[in-house]
Structure formats: C-alpha cells, structure tokens
C-alpha cells in the first residue's frame, strides 16, 4: 500500500536559446497538475538548420510541475509559423494540426504545405493529459530548411588545375586550397554557408574554423550523393573585407599507394582514385535592410597547392609550415605568386560524383573534438626519440605545440601497443617498420607553432615523437580525441570495479569507431562494416541516441547496393559505402572456405537495423525509405541460395574461438531473422501481400533450419554442434519449439559451464548468447562469463590492462574494435534491469527486472527513451536486504519485478497512483506502475 508520495525531477534539455520566450496559453486553462511540454525536437535535433526533409518529424517530452501528476498524454495540438514573433501573436500561418487524439510524442510528421529551400519555421505544441487537463503552449522551437535541390546551388564545383595525384612511384603533390576575398557592406541579419568538398575539407572564415565540426564531409557513396553542411556565420562576418578559405584532403575518396606509407591492401583493396580534390561553397548573406548577396565558388576563386603535402585516410598526414603563404587566411595572400584562379570541375555521367549527383544535407551528428588528453608519461628512447603514453587507447590525432629551426621535421608515429623492450609495436594497426602510419610536421622556424592533422585520424595509446629540439613537456604533444557527437543515452554504475571497467572499455571502443560512419577499427581498415554495426546494435542503441545517425548508415547500404547490370545485382556488400568495390573473394580460414564481402549476417542489416530503429524510436521513415532495397536484397539472397544448391556462401560465426558451429546454421538463422523482420516491417507499413509472402519465406526457412540442425540425444535437444553459438542462435531467433526451449537452454548453460564460463562465440553469436541466457532467466551464467578473469573474456581484458575492446576476447588482433560490445546492453537491461516490454514500441511499456547476481551489492542505470529518462537503482544492505528505486517517465508504464522471497515483506512508496501487485512468486514480486518514482524496500 502506498504510504507516502515523492517525486524526482528528470533533467531535460531546453530548446536552444528559446527557453525564455515561451508563449502564454491561449485556451483552455491548464489544470492545477497539468503536464508540461519540453524538449521539442525536429528530426531528432534541437532547433536545426539546413535540414532537407520536406516532412520533418516532430517530437517532444512530457514533464510535470513539482508535486504535479504525470498521467500521460491523451491528445496534442501543434501550431507552426514563420517566426517566433508570429506565434507570440497567436498566428500559425505555416500549419495547424488541430487537436489530435493521440498519445504519440515523437515521429509526428509535419503536414503543412510543401516546404521550400531556406524556409524558417517556428513551432510549438500543447497537450491534454489523461485526465483532460490541457498544458500551456510549449516554448517555441525552430527549424530551417537547407538547399533541397541541386538547382538551388549557383555555386560550382572547383578544382586546382596544377594538382596531380600522388602516384604509386612516390611523387607527391601538395593538396589544393581555395580562397575567396569579399566585402561585407553593412549589418548582417543572417548568413548561411552551404559547403562540402571531396575527399575532405576544412573551411575557415578569416583564418578561423567555421564550426567545431571536423573530418567533413560524412562518408557516402559518392556517385549517389555528396553530403553538405549548413553553417551559421551571422555573427562571424565583419564589416569590410572577409576571406573564406577551404583546405582539402584525400579521405576515402582518393586512396593512393605511396612507398613507405601504410596502405590497407591485399586482394581486398585496389588503387582507386575517384577524382581530384574539389570543393563547392555557397555563402548567402541577408542584410538588415533586406538585400541579399551570394558568395559562390566559381573561377573567380583563387587556388594554390597548400601546406598539406601528404594526405591519406589510412597512413597519416604531412604538413610543411614553410608553405604558409598558401594558407587561405588573408586577402593579401590570395594575390601571391603561388596562387591562380580555380578551374571548374568537369563532371559527367561517368565521373564521381556525376554531374547529376545530388548534394544532400548531412543529418548525422558531426564528428567533433571530444576532449584533449595530455600524456601520463614521457619516456626517452635516446637519440631525441620519445614515447608518450596517453593512458588509454582512443581515436584522434596528435596536436603539436613546439618551436624549432625552419626545415626541421617532427615525426609522430602512433601505436596501440609496446614491445617488451618498451619500443613501439605497430603490428595491431596494420603498419610495419617500412610501411608506416605517421604524422609529419616541418617547421617554419617562426616561434611557437601549433598543428594537428585535419584529414585523417588514428587509434592509439602510444606516440613516438622524433625530431623535437628539446625534451617534450606534457603540453608539447597532446591528443585530441575525436568521434561523432551522438548524444549518450545511458548511464551505469555498480559495486564491481571490474564490471565498471568493462563498461568503460566498451564505451571507449564504441566512441573510437563512431566517425561519420561506424567503423570496425580506427587503424588497419577503418571499414564501415555492416555486420559490425548489426552484431553490436543492442549495445550501440543502449549507450547512444543514434536516431539521427543510423538512418544514414542504412542509406549508405542502400546506395551501395549492386544495381542491375552490376555483378550480383541486389547484393549489399559487407562494407557500405563500398570504397573497395571488388568481386566477392574466397578466403581460407580454420572453419573452411569463406566468402568475403557477401554474407547474410552483414547484408541483412538493411532489414534488421530499420526494424530495431522502429522498435527503439518508433521510426517508420527509415523502413519506408529503404523498403525497396530490402526487397531487392531478399530477392538476391533467394537467387544466391538457389545458385549454390541451398547453401549460401558466407562467413559463419565470424571470429569465434569455437569453430565447430556449422557455417550454414549461422547463415540460415540470420536469413530467417531477416525474413521474419521483413514480414513484421511489411505489417507496420500496411503491405498485406508482402506480410503473407515473407511470413511464408520465414516459415520455410524455419522448417529447413529445424530439419538440418535440430538434434536429440539421451540428454535432450540441441542444435548444430551443440556449441554455445549453435544453441544460442536457435533460441534467440525463435527457431526452437516451445516444448524444446528448456532443454536447449539447459544445453546452452552446460556448454558455457563446460568451457569454464568462457565465451566461445564470435560476433554473430555473441548477441544471441546474451539474449538467450537473459530471456531464459540465467543472468547468473552471464555474470560468471562476464567477470571471468581468464582468457577469453571481458574480465580477462580488464585484468590484463586493456583500455578498449580488442578484436578478440583473448586480446589479439586490432586493439580497438567495438563489435564484441554486447555486454554493455546487458549491463543496462540485466544488472540495472531496464528493458522494453515485448511488443512495445518506443519504450511505451517498460519491463524493469534487475538481476541481483554474484557478489554485487548495488547496480544502477538509466536510459533516455523517446518518452523521457527511465532509471533503476538497487542496493543490498549489510544484512542482504534489497532496496530498489525506479523512475518511469511520463508517457510510459512499467512492470517492475522486485527480487524478493515469498516470505519477505515489501514496503512500497512513491508515485501518484498506487502500484498494482500483479504476482508474488517464490523469487519476486511483480507490480504494474504508472509514470513516477517508486521505492521498493524488502524487509
């Protein structure tokens, strides 16, 4: 029985710059406990500029005044105008939704008239709660459209006619820079720079970066789209002369082999150059008096071969500061002898990009500098060579702050490991002593000089620095840590330093591989592998809000899909964008011959990721946009299966330590899951014929899976080789009959115990292993696997000093891989107990069931759902009595399972509606609760 009431305020972001400009409610009057509307978002962003969706998705969260009720939402009303001032006057000239009876608070599509390029919209929302009380109108939020069509661009792609590729013979040409001097004649009301470049670009205004974004543009299939950014320069322009500058780098667009530099090679890579470095920029200035001017890239721009003398996405960057006259920072420089007029890029139907390739607004959160790290130790190696230890393996670049004689060169070589003698061990990065990854800076001799690379990055903990004129200080060479600025979605803590350490190294591996695309590792390959994304998706969606990030990764799969006329039309290669576009390659591995670049458990990401985005965020736009690509992929796999007599070539349970799992079991389980998810997707989208079609395909594959891989002996039912992966995949995919599940689960547990609580699956089987055990109520087994201090395993990695997840749980391979990070999903869903209920979408219904296992005395976690933050924290006192505190956000309900023996008494406080006791078993009490904060005390 509820004996008292308390609440906890959830901290939510307010809309940028608009919190003080709220609009008073017009009507009706809010009730005394009315819900508030906060955190308005457009296409998952706060007040974005430069979006290109003509039906942007609107979202908000609900909150209540201190002491007020949070009974949820019954209806909403949205109004939109061209300005906040109009909304203040009650004018909604862009759109009025009218009162809509709906509890939806996200993925509400704008339904006004067609939006135009550059159009600005202000909007706000009010809601009615479940008791009929109306909120006031929210504080306004805004969005601004970008350039929706190539016809909106008066700017042209420009190049440097003197530039030539870096050739395999070693001859190097510095990278082009571009500049334009222009005059601002009065007070500026608004200025927008629309900008992109290939392979990469860094833009400045009067010598200062136009934004905090780095490593632009985001990677795409460059023949299909090139993404641009919109920058707000309103407050940056000065009256008088200004200079807009652009430096370019190679990126993945221009991949070149140069002797002495590392190159990701073998038979999977080709020497490929898509085109010469180029840029396109359009600065639109609106003055206070209303007149407008446009500064656009064309042949009036000036260009030179700049100070960046070498640029490679894989092997580093070199900069010669003596060439500073070619930095586009001042008008006087642009008239120097090193400069010439830019030439127009000659784009055709066969170039990359094509003359018709669309310029598209990049909706991904940008890559930014997340932190600056000083070395924790500096060790002299003699002869002016120093090794800096930055304490942990991360992704980023070195930043130099030193002085020295003109012409002297400082070389910085990154590594993840050291050899036993203390020297660099570059083997895990793919580099060798003769083919290096390195950063080189040649001094100008003009005082203290500061530099960092702009067009690549590396994963490293250690940095060897050679060529300094004096011993380095901690601030002589620092590390800028860079990654995509995806918002964190969860928190976790426990009484176990080992488990907390596992959480830390997992997060660090994810961060290190979240660039504009999700890579496998930040050194050797930097490959946007679709399977690495899919296999670790649970943890990725747990730790970060990827609602604006993952849709572009799916788009990259769609644009990389092989087309009619290509070899294998419909295929989606293991890498997207497919920068090394080669035929599927057969490789020999211990488990047999595998086929690289074509695998069901990689290509099916085009179906399975959109389905999970729907489940997590309620996102139907992604599955709608790429539905045809899903169909084409399934058609391709059907033909592929028929052509190979029923056995689809592939990789199987990639990276497993137990190689006995049948390859076809892993492939067929993935194929079934894709078909099943496709049937569910079709149902959501109202495609009834396809529901029937793909449900039949899934049933057919399920029958085949059972026929081929179900076995039974005197101790029960098992699948495949009875390996951890075999039984886990069968259970997780739902391919085990209800009457067999307990037996197969028992076999799975027995396999784990027989391996001394080690994880023996690969990346494909790891998620199924965690989910099958958790769904089967065996969190105790998961705990024993996770904390196991011997190899292979997570506990071993922390105990042996790893600071990120490596490629294998035995510590081998690349030292910064994220694809084995599924443990982090379990920390939140298992130990903290925060899960979405079965059948729920966008976390409308929660299932809170903390796993009190091992010798843990407390664990806590939170997760930012589309409805708001949910949290769960439990602890045991010195007598072993449990206390659990749970917060459920407005718009959600929850079933809470409190671990308690049947003999224990329970004291429950909190909330505005008394929890309803649903069940009391020998091990738990189960309650249904509404939004609010609740405390459960076992006595």
Image (cartoon, rainbow, N blue to C red):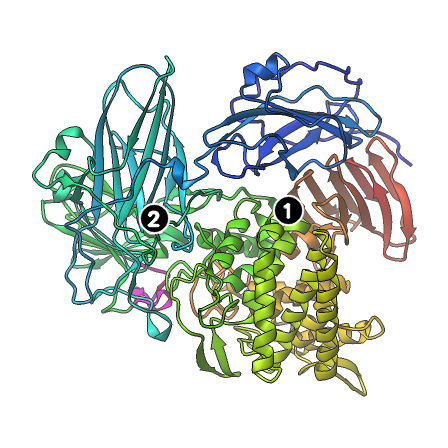
Provide the residue designation for mark 1: 619
Mark sitting earlier along the chain (2/1): 2
Q: Percent x, y for residue 517? A: 45, 53
- The answer to which quarter of the image holds residue 232 is top left
Q: Distance between the residues labelled 2 and 1?
A: 43 Å
- Please tell me whether residue 408 is drawn above or below residue 297 in the rendered image: below
Q: Percent x, y for residue 399? A: 29, 45
- The answer to which quarter of the image holds residue 437 is bottom left
The numbered dot on residue 681 is: none
Whether residue 421 is in magenta: the answer is yes
- Please tell me whether residue 779 is drawn above or below residue 913 in the rendered image: below
| Image-based side of 592 in relation to 60, left or right | left
**Residue, x 70% and y 57% (percent of image)?**
682
- The answer to which quarter of the image holds residue 360 is top left
| Image-based side of 132 in relation to 522, left or right | right
| Image-based side of 605 in relation to 417, left or right | right
Provide the residue designation for mark 2: 375
Whether residue 429 is in magenta: the answer is yes
Q: Percent x, y for residue 82? A: 54, 21
The front one of 678 and 732 is 678
**Residue, x 69% and y 28% (percent of image)?**
97
Q: Label 1 crowding class (10 Å Cα cut-off): few <14, some 14-19, many 20+?
A: many
The front one of 918 and 476 is 918
Region rendered in magenta: 414-431
The front one of 86 and 832 is 86
The count of marks equals 2
């Amino acid at each position: 029985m509820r004996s008292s009431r308390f609440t906890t305020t959830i901290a939510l972001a307010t809309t940028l710059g608009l919190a003080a400009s709220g609009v008073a409610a017009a009507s009706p009057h809010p009730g005394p406990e009315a819900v508030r509307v906060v955190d308005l978002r457009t296409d998952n962003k706060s007040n974005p500029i430069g979006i290109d969706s003509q039906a942007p998705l609107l979202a908000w969260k609900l909150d209540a005044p201190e002491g007020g009720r949070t009974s949820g939402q019954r209806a909403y009303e949205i109004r939109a105008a061209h300005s906040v001032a109009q909304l203040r006057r009650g004018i909604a000239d862009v759109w009025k939704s009218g009162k809509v009876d709906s509890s939806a608070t996200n993925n509400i599509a704008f339904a006004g008239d067609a939006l135009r390029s550059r159009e600005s919209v202000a909007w706000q929302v009010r809601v009615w709660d479940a008791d009929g009380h109306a909120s006031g109108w929210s504080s306004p939020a805004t969005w601004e459209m970008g350039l929706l069509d190539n016809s909106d661009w008066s700017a042209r792609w420009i190049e440097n006619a003197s530039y030539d590729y870096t050739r395999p013979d070693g001859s190097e040409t510095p990278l082009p820079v571009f500049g334009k001097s222009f005059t601002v004649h009065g007070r500026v009301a608004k200025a927008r720079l629309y900008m992109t470049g290939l392979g990469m670009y860094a833009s400045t205004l009067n010598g200062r970066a136009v934004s905090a974004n780095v490593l632009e543009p985001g990677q795409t299939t460059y023949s299909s789209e090139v993404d641009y950014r919109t920058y707000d320069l309103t407050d940056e322009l000065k009256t008088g002369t200004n200079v807009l500058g652009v430096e370019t780098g190679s990126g993945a667009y221009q991949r070149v082999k140069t002797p002495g530099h590392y190159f990701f090679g073998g038979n999977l890579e080709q020497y490929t150059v898509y085109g010469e470095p180029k840029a396109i920029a359009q600065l639109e200035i609106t003055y206070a008096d209303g007149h407008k001017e446009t500064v656009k890239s064309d042949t009036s721009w000036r260009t030179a071969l700049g100070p960046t003398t070498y640029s490679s996405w894989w092997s580093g960057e070199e900069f010669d500061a003596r060439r500073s006259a070619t930095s586009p920072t001042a008008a006087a420089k642009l008239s120097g002898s090193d400069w010439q007029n830019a030439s127009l890029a000659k784009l055709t139907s066969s170039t990359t990009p094509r003359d018709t390739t669309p310029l598209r607004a990049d909706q991904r959160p940008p890559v930014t500098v997340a932190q600056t790290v000083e070395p924790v130790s500096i060790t002299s190696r003699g002869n002016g060579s120093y090794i800096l230890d930055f304490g942990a393996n991360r992704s980023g670049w070195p930043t130099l702050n030193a002085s020295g004689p003109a012409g002297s060169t400082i070389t910085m070589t990154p590594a993840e490991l050291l050899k036993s003698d203390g020297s660099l061990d570059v083997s895990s990065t793919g580099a060798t002593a003769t083919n290096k990854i390195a950063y080189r800076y040649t001094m100008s001799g003009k005082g203290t000089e500061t530099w960092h690379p702009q067009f690549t990055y590396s994963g490293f903990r250690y940095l060897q620095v050679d060529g300094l004129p004096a011993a380095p200080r901690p601030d002589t060479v620092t590390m800028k840590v860079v990654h995509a600025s995806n918002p964190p979605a969860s928190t976790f803590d426990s009484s176990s330093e080992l488990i907390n350490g596992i959480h830390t190294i997992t997060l660090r591996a994810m961060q290190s591989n979240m660039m504009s695309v999700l890579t496998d590792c930040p050194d050797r390959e930097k490959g946007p592998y679709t399977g690495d994304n899919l296999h670790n998706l649970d943890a990725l969606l747990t730790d970060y809000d990827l609602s604006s990030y993952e849709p572009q990764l799916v788009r990259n799969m769609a644009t990389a899909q092989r087309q009619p006329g290509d070899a294998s039309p419909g295929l989606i290669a293991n890498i997207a964008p497919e920068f090394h576009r080669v035929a599927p390659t057969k490789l020999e591995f211990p488990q047999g011959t595998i086929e690289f670049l074509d695998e069901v458990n990689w290509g099916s990401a085009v179906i399975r990721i959109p389905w999970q985005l729907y489940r997590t965020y309620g996102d139907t736009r992604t599955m709608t946009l790429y539905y045809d690509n899903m169909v084409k992929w399934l058609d391709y796999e059907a033909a592929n299966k028929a052509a190979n007599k029923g056995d689809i070539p592939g990789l199987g349970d990639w990276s497993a330590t137990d190689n006995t799992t049948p390859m076809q079991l892993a492939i067929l389980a993935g194929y079934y899951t894709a078909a099943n998810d496709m049937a569910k997707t079709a149902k959501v989208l109202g495609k009834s014929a396809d529901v029937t079609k793909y449900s039949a395909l899934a049933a057919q594959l399920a029958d085949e899976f059972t026929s081929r891989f179900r076995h039974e002996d005197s101790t029960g039912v098992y699948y495949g080789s009875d390996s951890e992966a075999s039984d886990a995949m069968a259970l997780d995919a739902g391919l085990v009959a209800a009457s067999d599940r307990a037996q197969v689960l028992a076999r799975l547990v027995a396999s784990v115990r027989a391996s001394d609580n080690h994880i023996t699956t690969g990346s494909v089987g790891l998620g199924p292993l965690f989910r099958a055990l958790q769904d089967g109520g065996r969190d105790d087994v998961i705990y024993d696997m996770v904390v196991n201090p011997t190899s292979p395993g997570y506990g071993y990695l922390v105990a042996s000093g790893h600071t990120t997840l490596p490629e294998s749980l035995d510590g081998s391979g690349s030292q910064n891989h994220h694809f084995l990070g599924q443990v982090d999903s379990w920390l939140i869903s298992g130990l903290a107990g925060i899960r979405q209920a079965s059948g729920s979408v966008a976390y409308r219904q929660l299932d809170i069931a903390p796993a009190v296992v091992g010798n843990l005395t407390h664990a806590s976690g939170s997760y930012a759902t589309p409805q708001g933050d949910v949290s769960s924290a439990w602890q045991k006192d010195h007598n072993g009595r449990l206390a659990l505190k749970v917060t459920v956000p407005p718009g959600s309900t929850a079933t809470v399972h409190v671990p308690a023996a049947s003999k224990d008494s329970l004291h429950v406080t909190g909330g505005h509606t008394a929890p309803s006791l649903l069940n009391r078993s020998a091990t738990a009490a189960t309650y249904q609760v509404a939004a609010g904060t609740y405390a459960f005390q076992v006595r």
